[in-house]
Amino acid sequence: MIELRTPGEIAAMRPAGRFVADVLTRLTDEVQVGVNLLELDAIAHRMIRDHGAESCYIDYHPSFGASPFGKVLCTSVNDAVLHGLPHDYALQDGDVVSLDFAASVDGWVADSAVTVVAGTARPADSALIDTTRRALAAGIEQARNGHKLGDVSAAIGDVCHAAGYSVNLEFGGHGVGRTMHGDPHVPNDGRPSRGLRLRPGLVIAIEPWLLQTTDRIVTDPDGWTLRSRDGSRGAHSEHTVAVTDGDPLVLTARA
Ligand code: MF3
Ligand code: CO
């Protein structure tokens, strides 16, 4: 079911968006050679506690998950791209790290992801990350009253294809509200002018993710982490966005 939020409800979602943005800003600064993924999760955990927020991940146990997620942050390194379960690993120079974080504040959820490099980035990795960012920006730009969901999807897909990447349609964006995952599903490729008509009050997470040389993924033995099938590296960029009667409102915008 598609739920539309009133302007008052959208306003009430802003603290969640700001909190998620603040956590990712802090974690982005912490990504350095030698830093352990468990420490990144611990920092996010402390920030949740100090803020009186609630994790959307720690008890999360969907049909595809082996057991409750148990951490508050997804850390997907190198050939991992989504749902990376933090584990005892110290970052090395050139590692590509996708940080995906969702939490609720005052009963409203925000969901966002960013990909950063520890130390010195390889050019091919910078290009991959940059493409997910540009795809996200292109998708957000289409999240307007009267547009169709297919306009958002097509804009994302166009940026990815133009840069030479193929797009996986198994995991994409989603409605966000009182819970992390709601309708509609927001595929990372599609056809313009097709699908749901976007209305003010629709709140969606838009989340392009890409792999260097494949669109196929496999699940790690940990039961959560999704890796590229060919070992090539991945990147992921995500914001929670509200459709308004004016410009798209990026609830998780970082300063
Ligand atoms: N935040 C992710 C998304 O963008 C979902 C992570 S679920 C977890 O939809 F299981 F990894 F926690
Ligand atoms: Co999401």
Image (spheres, rainbow, N blue to C red):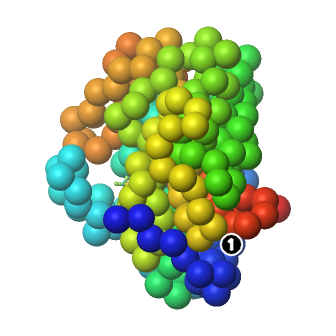
Q: Residue at image x 73%, y 46%?
A: 141
Q: Residue at image x 64%, y 87%?
A: 8
Query: Quick check: 251 left or right of 208?
Result: right
Q: Residue 3 at what x, y percent from top left?
A: 44, 70
Q: Residue at image x 60%, y 17%?
A: 161
Q: Nearer the viewer, residue 12 or 244?
A: 244
Residue ID for mark 1: 18
Query: Quick check: 142 left or right of 234?
Result: right
Query: Quick check: 64 left or right of 165?
Result: left
User: Which amino acid type is marked by label 1?
Assistant: Arg
* Any part of residue 187 in sight: yes
Q: Residue 65 at what x, y percent from top left?
A: 22, 50
Q: Nearer the viewer, residue 161 or 144?
A: 144
Q: Residue at image x 53%, y 58%?
A: 204
Q: Residue 200 at what x, y percent from top left?
A: 63, 67
In the rendered image, the quadrant that contains the N terminus is bottom left
Figure check: 68 above or below 32: below
* Any part of residue 25 in sight: no
In the rendered image, the quadrant that contains the C terminus is bottom right
